[in-house]
Image (tube, rainbow, N blue to C red):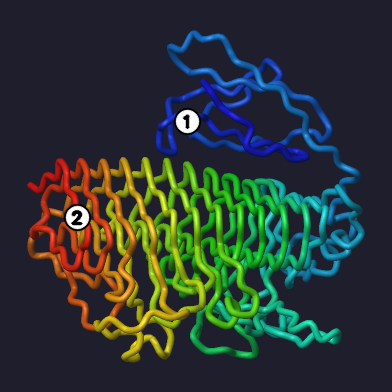
Amino acid sequence: MNFRLAAVMKRSVTLELINRDIVYTRPYIVLLNGEELMRENRNVISIFGLEPDTEYRIAIILAEGGGEEPKWLSFRTAPESVLLDVRAFGALGDGKNDDTACIQAAIEACPKDGTVRIPKGRYLTRPLFLRSGLSLWLDRGAVLLGDPSREHYPRLPGMTERSDGKGGFNLGSWEGDPETSYASLLTGIELRNVDIFGEGTVDGNADRSDWWEEHKTKRGAWRPRTIFLCRCRCIRIQGVLVRNSPSWTIHPYYTDGISLYNVTIWNPPDSPNTDGFDPESCEDVLLLGCRISVGDDCIAIKSGKARMAGERRKASRNFALRNSILERGHGALTIGSEAAAGVYRVEASLCIFSGTDRGLRLKTRRGRGPDCFYDEIYFHHIRMENVPMPFTFNMFYHCDADGHERYVQSQEALPVNAMTPGIGAVRAENIRCSGVDSALLCAYGLPERPIGAILLRGIDAVFLEDPERPKRQVLMMDDFPPMRGMSIYAKNIGSLKLENISIRGAEKEPILQNISDYESRAFILR
């Protein structure tokens, strides 16, 4: 069986099988230094308990009936300067006493290329600030538990004027604007080369505090995330469970080169604004073998609102998602709407979307910002299970207080200017959708700037059978009717190409309006 080394750290490694199976494959055996280590069937696995600066040989063979000779790969774990245990610094890990000072002391004392170990236990803590060159190891059974009292959380100012006259210094952020927010349980400011790894848990503890109450009100400062990374480079998170977040769970902000391997993100289904992973103005982002189940969008790619896009314009680019499961969220993978600086080159493949309201969700509107353009969006080899609306592209998204103004919602072709958003090329291939309810594709472009090009190829969709089920709201825009059983609704599109499409159980034929270039091949509606 072919595989690759996805990430080699000091005490762990992540492997990815190379195949066309979605998330799971045939059972196999992992051999480490000639001995059986584990039996698995996931395409992406992480192995812990390795020693630093040590040579290993690894192979994968089929569990039954393979008979093939193992193909060995050799790797060497990264060197480690020192291992510091937080209990040696006085941390108790009893879930009652405040361990913040002890853990922070271990972090501050740790030299470059060192590791801070958090062993089994429940460590009640206020926000912790990480350092460059650090590895944070959450061992199996270790829980970092967020302090439930907001009075114990320091604030990150949204914008502070620099003394040297070079503009503002931005720390806090809230939904695309530089706003004062509480520091997060794990906070990183301008870090380089940080690993967070292990089989432990980072628990925001929001289910036992008041973070989810009056969630639309700023009380002292805006709610914290669980992990916030501001202007960082080369961050890897591997294996950990992150749960019960006060708001967005993991929020990389102007951060490049962030990778998540076998990370699980879990928030209750009714928890407000608890997106799973929100890279904002980030480049080179990878999610591999992750599982996300939350109360809002599972993944939302952003690049700020108009002010940040104007003052510190930075698009989000080069996003890859593979062999992951996205569950329960409003959108499995969402782009926008706070993406005023644009989003480019997004690829999702070999994933399962299960029980999310929408699959691929693009949302934007007039007035978002000077470079709000989405392009090169590619989805392929994905299975959507009980996803009512697999593809929704909305350029009239009515977010924020001004989202219902005439300028945003007008159906007339308005003059194109710097605040006119755009969507370029979107491609979806080899996708199976079951439990479709409202519409397979609902795409609504602007009359003055239609969506550039949509290609659906190799799509198999099965709608729900209950003809009495209620209609649902597909697009969050004014005066757009709820739908049920709509095969395809597309309006204001430059090019729409449908190839090898099979739709079963839809009640309505496609509705196409203002499509400049339309092509349909092997489109079967039954």
Q: Position of residue 12 (x, y in %)?
A: 71, 38
Residue at image point 64% right, 67% down: 253
Residue closest to the eye, 350 or 114: 350
Rendering quarter of residue 189: bottom right
Q: Position of residue 517 (x, y in %)?
A: 22, 57
| Above or below: residue 215 compared with residue 491 | below
Q: Is residue 20 visible?
A: yes
| Above or below: residue 386 compared with residue 169 | above
* Mark 2 / mark 1, whichever is N-terminal: 1
Q: In the rendered structure, which amino acid carries the disc numbered 2?
A: Tyr
* Label of residue 41 in the image: 1
Q: Secondary structure at mark 1?
A: strand
In the image: residue 496, left or right of residue 289:
left
Q: Is residue 207 visible?
A: no
The Cα atoms of the two marked residues, 2 and 1, are separated by: 42 Å
Residue at image point 72% right, 67% down: 187
In the image: residue 47, left or right of residue 377:
right
* Label of residue 518 in the image: 2
Q: Position of residue 505 (x, y in %)?
A: 11, 51
Bin the neighbour count of mark 2 within 10 Å (Cα to Cα): few under 14, some 14-19, many 20 and up: some
Q: In the rendered structure, which amino acid carries the disc numbered 1?
A: Asn
In the image: residue 156, left or right of residue 403:
right
